[in-house]
Amino acid sequence: MMMLAAMPLTGMAGELKAVTDADKGKVEVTLDGKPFMGLIFRGHPKPVVYPVIGPGGVAMTRRWPLEAAAAGEEQDHPHHKSIWFNHGDVNGVDFWKEGADAGKIVVTKVPAVEMSGAAEESRVTIRTEEEWLKPDGVRVCTSATVITCGTEGTSRFIDYAVTVKASEGEVTFGDTKEGTMGLRSHPALNLKGAVAKGQCVNSEGETGGAIWGRHAKWVDYWGPVDGKVLGIACFDHPGNLRHPTTWHARDYGLIAANPFGLHDFEKAPKGAGKHVMKRGESLTLRYRWLFHEGDAKAADVAGSWAKWAAVRE
């Protein structure tokens, strides 16, 4: 078994440590010796971030289908796996769904893992390179992903920066709601369901089901989980395509930032949301997942977004 360990960092935020198991295709990050997050980079049709453990050691994303379903957890949309990045139409190939007729995103080598910072500013960064493949194995494009995790006060975060390159020729991200930077939440944070007690709001003050398809800098879902009020916010970076993005955010726990689905979201003419890259061009999209205590106001989600958004590199 090939194991690679990164040196831990200690400080006020606790000890961050990352271990890579190349044979199992996993990077595991711990905080004070307890699970924080993991990257599963083999064994699925796309890379998956799982588990995701929030403040107080509470799991923030759905267990199923990566593990047996928790109590009250819906067993629908098996392609909704914790946290992921893909899209439902890339040169006509569906990378959102899974199956014999769907595309696959394959990590081409063991991820590079770095430690940085000190005290409460310590970070773990995971870098991967991917190929986006048609069902027949032909490459559509390539990408490079940087995942950075850490803590801020009592909150935890996972930053996702993906650069997709038109390495094989022209690449079109098609106009569909099925995308793109996605998360399937703990069922207690859903707005409907057997154990659902969640609420949601976006940066524009819209709430509930009204946030679907709307433009917003961020969205936030929160509710009582295991006796604590916890929340998940997703931030869209000002440098992203069509910021503030549109959101494929559902009442059953799907939270997805998608700048491409304008036909579905806004009833724009078909194809209005597509984005074309000529050979050699690239597109970088940056997001933050923030896992916090309290509701959006108590956690100052708006202030956290502003602080994060001010960093432009």
Image (cartoon, rainbow, N blue to C red):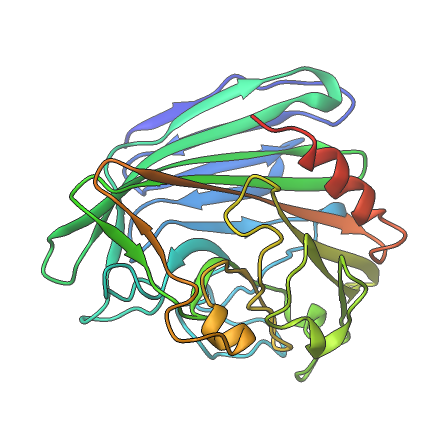
Q: Position of residue 170 (x, y in %)?
A: 21, 48
Q: How many marks?
A: 0
Residue at image x 54%, y 73%?
Answer: 265
Q: Is residue 81 left or right of residue 206?
A: left
Query: Is residue 196 in view?
Result: no
Q: Position of residue 272 (x, y in %)?
A: 42, 67
Compared with residue 36, is residue 127 higher up or lower down, i.e. above or below?
Answer: above
Compared with residue 143, is residue 212 higher up or lower down, i.e. above or below?
Answer: below
Closer to the camera in the image, 170 or 157 = 170
Compared with residue 212, is residue 167 higher up or lower down, i.e. above or below?
Answer: above
Work out which quarter of the rendered image holds the C terminus and state it: top right
Work out which quarter of the rendered image holds the N terminus and state it: top left
Q: Is residue 102 left or right of residue 222?
A: left
Q: Position of residue 108 (x, y in %)?
A: 23, 37
Q: Is residue 12 left or right of residue 51?
A: right
Closer to the camera in the image, 106 or 10 = 106
Residue at image x 68%, y 82%?
Answer: 192
Query: Is residue 220 in view?
Result: yes
Residue 62 picture quarter: bottom right
